[in-house]
Structures are given as C-alpha cells and as structure tokens.
Image (tube, rainbow, N blue to C red):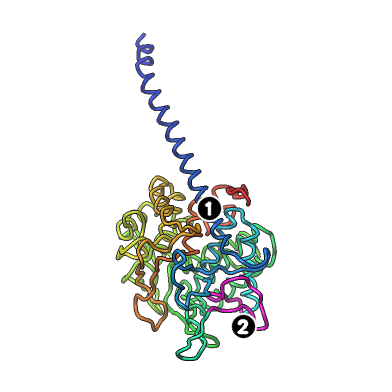
Amino acid sequence: MKRANWSIQTLPVLAFILAGIVLFASLAKADDEQRRQLACSLCDGLAAQMSGEPEQPFIFRSFEPANGGSALHPALENTGFTYDNAVALMALYGCQRKKEARRVADALVLALETDRHYHDGRLRNAYRSGPVTPGKEGMLLPGYWNATSNSWIEDGYQVGSATGSTAWGALALLMAFEETEQPAYLDAARKIMDWIHRSTTDPRNAGYFGGYFGHEPTPERMTWKSTEHNLDVYAADRWLAQLDEGGDWPHQGDRALQFLNAMWNEGEGRFFIGSVPDSNAPNIEMSGLDAELWPLIAVPDFKGKASRVIEWTEIHHGVDGGFDFNSDRDGIWLEGTAQAALVLRLTGQPAKAEPLFKTIEAQRTPGNLIYATVNEQLSTGLQVGPNSTPGDFKYYRLPHIGATGWAVLAALDLNPFVGSAGQASDGKESPCPQK
C-alpha cells in the first residue's frame, strides 16, 4: 500500500520532469534548425561572391566594402588571403556546395604550380582575387598602382609565405581530396607540407618558424614561432598520416606537437601565443584567442584541458556577446567568436555557444556575409611585418570571408583540423537545399 501511495504522489513530479525533457528537446531541435539556416544562408552569401565560368578556378576577395560604401584600401582591393579562401572552401564543402568549393581548390593548386618565381611547394599568403586565368606570368598576386611614386606596389606580407597560412592551404586541399578523391589535391597538400618541413623547421628546437616575409628572391625569414602555426602544421601532418601511410607525417607532426606542449602554461591553464625569436622561450607579452582555442579541437590529448582553457579565455578575452582577439578586450572579433562557438560545442559546452550564435546572426550583412568586427576597428597587438609599427595589424568593420567561413563551420559543427573520420557525423548529408 505504501508503495502504491508513493507512486501516485510522484506522478505529477514525473510528468513535470518528462515535460521538461520534451521542452528541452524541442528547444534543442529549434536551435539546430536555426544554425542550419544560418549556415545555408552564409554559404549562399559566399557563392554569390563568385564570378566567372561555373568551373573556373576562383579566389575570394577577403574583405568587401561595408554596405556598398567607400572603396577598400588599395592594399585590399584585389586581395584574397590564402587562409580566408581555405576556410571558405571548407565551409562550402560543409554545405555540400561542391562545385563552388572545387573552384577554390583548383585555384590553390594553380597557385602552387604556376607561381611567377617559386617552384618549391610554397603558397603565398595572398593572391589576386576573382576568376583565375593563368597567363605566362603565372598566378597573379595582389597589388596596386601608386600614382605618387609611379610604381606598382605589392605588400610584403601578402607576397610572403607564413607557415600557418600555407598549412591552411594544405588542410583545405586535404578536405577537397576527401570530397573528390582527386589525386591532384592530395599531391598538392604533400608538396605544401614538404616545403614547410624543409624550409621552416627550427634546427635547434622543437617546432616550426613563422615563415617568410617579403619579396622574392630573398624574403626575410621569421624566426619566432607561433602556437597557431604549429597547431596548423600538426593538424595537416596528422590528417596526411591518415591518407598517406607511406609518408613521414607522424614524425614531422610530432615536432609541432613538442612545441605546443612547450607552450602550455600549467600554472595559468592556457597556451602561450608562441615563442620569441630564435628560441622556445614563450612570448609572455600578449595572448591570442586562436592560440587558446584551436588546440582543444585539433589535438586529441588537449581536449582534457578544455575546461581550464575556456575558463581562462572567458576571463581574458571575453566581452559582452563574444570574444576579442587579444586580452585588451576592446571589442568583438567575430571570426574568433565563431571559433569559440565551435570549440564550445565540440568540447561539450553547447549552452555557452548559443549566445555567440545570436551575436553572429545579428552581424550578418544584407548580402549574407559576416562582418569582421562589431566596432569600427579592433586591435590585435600584432604587427603586419617585422619593420612595421607594433600593433598595426587591426581588423575593421568590413564583410569578411574568413569570419563568414568560420560561422558556417561553427553552425555545422565541422572541425577543420580533422579528416572525415574525426567528424561527429559522416558529413555527406546535405544540410542545405541546392539552388
């Protein structure tokens, strides 16, 4: 009798609990649908930027004028950064916009094969944006005519080869290979990573240098090392090891992993941004959001550090509604906010990611791109080049291909650092209805 009475009394409680579960599931499903719609609309925005013939190789211009406003600075007018294009390629594949994604992959292969000077496997940090029609001079580089000096100007960073930017080209081509099984993409990724290993390895310490700045034939070697760059190298080598068992990719990736371990600050529960030049001594003067977050989803052994790293990052990079690039917290960096949303979801904290998606959604342009910043400009603490003014690398409130691509990756839970075997799903179903 007592058992019967107890069961009857608890029925309302059980009904309340069940109702809560149903409501939670319903809200989660609604959030999933909102994220899917966001990803699809942003992929539409990316596709709308593409001109030329349907199968012509293409390089995205990284930044667009804000709301049809004034023209971009001449240094950005025809500039498509390799990193931004790699992220956009991955986003398009995530939406199953395969034809558009392949145009970018083909452009990266052409960039590797038809450089006007280098034939050693390196990519430049940027290329001339738009449809690609290689001529005798090879893949075109960005630049502009300066009427005052009566000369053609090319930016030293854009024509250089940063280790991380180059590795992102390899990551994108590895995804293209998995999607298409075209050997040219795998071969190009191998060449890129071989160049990194030959040309940027620190001969005395673990890890890879920052790459090269400036014009051919003698660009300046950057001897600092970046946590983010080494993370990119590790991820590309690990992915290659899964696809090309005959290579020495695990050994090369271990060099990068050793550096990443050296950049771990156990006392604070976070990663240093990198090392000072010619050393593995950490740079303690600044921090970078990507250096904190990316290791958590790229290195399996680091996932256990997620709770500490995220807590530190929220304190030192968090701002109302999102995250800043560095710890001065002077505004929202939307690319990094999307990165944080993805990392939070993939490390088991999806509730914290939902407000970030609301911020991203609110910063969508009429053309379905995401702005780089919420404020008019955002500091990073970084330098554009070795001889430029400290802290002169800034982001501005312009529609940004990189931020748009990361927002798509976050909305689709697509980890750009691992192959298809490492994704939460097989990734083959199409989340977006084809046009």
Return the mark for residue 57: none
Quadrant (top left, top right, bottom left, bottom right) of the N terminus:
top left
User: Could you say which is closer to the camera, residue 302 or residue 70?
Assistant: 70
What amino acid is found at the position of numbered circle 1 in the picture? Ser
What amino acid is found at the position of numbered circle 2 in the picture? Arg
Picture layout, residue 267 above or below residue 154: above
- Identify which residue is drawn at 37% across, 20% down: 12
Return the mark for residue 116: 2
- Identify which residue is drawn at 65% across, 76% down: 113
- Judged from this view, the residue extending furthest toward the bottom is 150
416 relative position to 101: left or right: left
Whether residue 137 is in magenta: the answer is yes
- Report the residue marked by disc 1: 41
State the extent of the magenta-drawn residues as a range.
117-142
Q: Position of residue 194 (x, y in %)?
A: 59, 73
234 relative position to 381: left or right: right
